[in-house]
């Protein structure tokens, strides 16, 4: 797919660089994130990764004052990125195991909507090794790909106002873990006691980093 | 450090805020920070502080404090029974009772030198839903960095400005959102025609709007980054305007975008107030 650039107001642009959950798109996302971090374009205040997109926010710059990019100069930024970004996902430097009690509020609904038994839903969720494609939504929330095709459901029509910390959830081709109490629209299938985000944990506030490999392990109430 | 106030009641929400913590969005950390930057800066200026000093953000009504030592306190933003845009000299033992709700949603209290508040990832901004700090509670003692009796300004009583108005109905200009073209022509026209009502379920994450159901394109399969001010439309066809503590990534289609100034104005629309969107 061609890269596309969509302006988001006067100071931000959304770059899209893929349209599927392939290894190639993930590789591009991780490679792009690394490039933006090590060699940011002038005036870049913030970048936020999606699965196949990145939001570039420009603003105040210490040296040059206010940076206002034109559509033309953003094109140059994008051309520069395209030259350095590759499609090869880096090898995972580690595998993190997440113990899960599978008793989520939506487990029975997920089972009936997918036509599977609850045991089979759990088996298929724990059966594969996921990759941390990006962190987003709330601090340390890992977007893990990709989910078994038989478990894919659209998001809930009405997001929940309150989801408790440690909830393990699925939506579309994604699975993830809510690191803190928050609102959200995914289907809740279980919960973990692992702390995904602790701002007081010196040097490493986030349990998972982009590109990590992750495995879910079904455990009983007493093991979590 | 000067112990200045004790919280007798935090009301509908009392949190430390500053300009927020940019640079962490890619770890899922929302920028956070004051909901109405111009009111927060005004409070700091009234207290003789730097613009970016830590302020106390109050929501709607009901906050109550006891004064522990004499000194100056400035209030700006929403009107809660104390005229906004003024600084007052308080006596020891006095009780400040902000129980009224006249206008706006968020009010800011600033004290000389700024408040003493714990920093997390480089900012004192509390975002309880993200696990960044906690809202203030009954019994908490609030300390400021300088002697509240000796603020850094020379023109006491002359700092009053033209009062900011927070009408319950606003019109705000929007930019097209990344999925603007994915919405039908009818949905786009309806979005701009509708008088949207601010829901009581609005908070620092998002201002939820209620009105006739918008016909929406399907959710985005590949979750995308979200900019503050994005107007996301849920599966129920109701818009949510992403605010300071909102999610950094999401899958609902975004029909429009508000700039920072418009977000501040929207934040001050009380539940039941109305919003109309205009194209730029």
Image: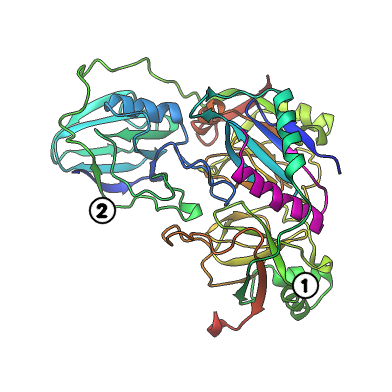
Contact flag, marks 2 and 1 (Cβ < 8 Å): no
Q: Is residue B258 above or below residue A193?
A: above
In terms of image quadrants, where is residue A119? Answer: bottom right
**Residue B21 among magenta residues:** no
Q: Residue B139 carries which label?
A: 2
Identify the image's colour scheme: rainbow, by chain, secondary structure or one colour: rainbow
**Looking at the image, residue B173 lies above or below residue B227:** above
Report helix, strand or loop for mark 1.
helix
Mark 2 packing: few (<14 Cα in 10 Å), some, or many (20+)? some
**Residue B22 on image: x %, y %:** 51, 40
Q: Quadrant of the N terminus of chain B?
A: top left
- The reply, left or right, for residue B119 in relation to residue B251 is left
For the residue pair A97 and B226, the one nearer the viewer reads as A97
User: Going by the image, does B220 lie left or right of B46?
Assistant: right
Q: Mark 1 lies on which chain?
A: A
Apparent side of residue A9 relative to residue A223 in the rendered image (left or right) = right
Same-subunit check for callouts 2 and 1: no
Quadrant location, the C terminus of chain B: top right
Span of residues in magenta: A15-41
- Residue A16 located within the stretch drawn in magenta: yes
Q: Is residue B215 above or below residue A113?
A: above
Q: Quadrant of residue B17?
A: top left
Mark 2 lies on a secondary structure that is loop
């Amino acid at each position: 797919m061609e890269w596309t650039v969509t302006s988001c107001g006067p100071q931000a642009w959304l770059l899209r660089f893929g349209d599927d959950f392939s290894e190639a798109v993930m590789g591009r996302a991780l490679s792009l994130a690394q490039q933006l971090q090590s060699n940011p374009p002038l005036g870049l205040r913030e970048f936020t990764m999606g699965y196949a997109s990145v939001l570039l926010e420009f603003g105040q710059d210490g040296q040059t004052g206010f940076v206002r990019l034109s559509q033309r100069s953003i094109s140059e930024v994008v051309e520069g990125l395209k030259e350095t970004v590759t499609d090869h996902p880096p090898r995972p430097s580690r595998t993190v195991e997440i113990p899960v009690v599978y008793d989520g509020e939506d487990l029975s609904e997920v089972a009936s909507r997918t036509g599977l038994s609850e045991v089979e839903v759990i088996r298929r969720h724990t059966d594969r090794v996921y990759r941390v494609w990006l962190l987003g939504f709330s601090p340390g929330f890992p977007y893990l790909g990709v989910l078994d095709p038989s478990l894919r459901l659209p998001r809930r029509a009405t997001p929940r106002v309150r989801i408790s910390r440690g909830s393990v959830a699925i939506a579309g081709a994604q699975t993830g873990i809510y690191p803190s109490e928050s609102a959200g629209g995914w289907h809740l299938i279980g919960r973990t006691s692992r702390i995904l985000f602790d701002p007081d944990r010196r040097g490493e506030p986030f349990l998972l980093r982009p590109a990590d490999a992750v495995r879910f392990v079904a455990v009983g109430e007493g093991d979590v | 450090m000067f112990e200045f106030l004790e919280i007798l009641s935090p009301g509908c929400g009392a949190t430390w805020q500053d300009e927020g913590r940019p640079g962490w969005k890619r770890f899922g950390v929302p920028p956070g920070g004051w909901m109405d930057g111009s009111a927060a800066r005004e409070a700091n200026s009234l207290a003789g502080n730097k613009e970016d000093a830590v302020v106390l953000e109050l929501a709607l009504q009901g906050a109550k404090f006891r004064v522990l030592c004499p000194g100056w306190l400035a209030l700006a933003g929403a009107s809660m029974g104390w005229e906004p845009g003024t600084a007052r000299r308080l006596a020891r033992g006095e009780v400040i009772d902000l129980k009224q709700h006249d206008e706006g949603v968020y009010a800011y209290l600033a004290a000389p030198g700024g408040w003493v508040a714990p920093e997390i990832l480089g900012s004192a901004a509390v975002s309880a839903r993200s696990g960044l700090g906690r809202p203030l509670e009954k019994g908490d003692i609030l300390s400021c960095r300088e002697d509240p009796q000796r603020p850094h300004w020379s023109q006491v009583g002359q700092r009053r400005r033209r009062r900011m108005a927070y009408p319950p109905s606003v019109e705000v200009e929007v930019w097209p959102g990344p999925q603007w073209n994915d919405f039908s022509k009818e949905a786009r026209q309806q979005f701009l025609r509708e008088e949207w009502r601010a829901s009581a379920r609005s908070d620092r994450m998002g201002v939820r709007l209620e009105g006739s159901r918008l016909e929406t394109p399907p959710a985005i399969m590949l979750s995308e980054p979200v900019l503050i001010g994005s107007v996301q439309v849920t599966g129920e066809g109701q818009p949510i305007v992403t605010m300071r503590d909102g999610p950094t990534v999401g899958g609902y289609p975004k029909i429009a975008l508000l700039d920072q100034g418009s977000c501040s104005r929207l934040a001050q629309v009380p539940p039941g107030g109305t919003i109309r969107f205009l194209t730029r």
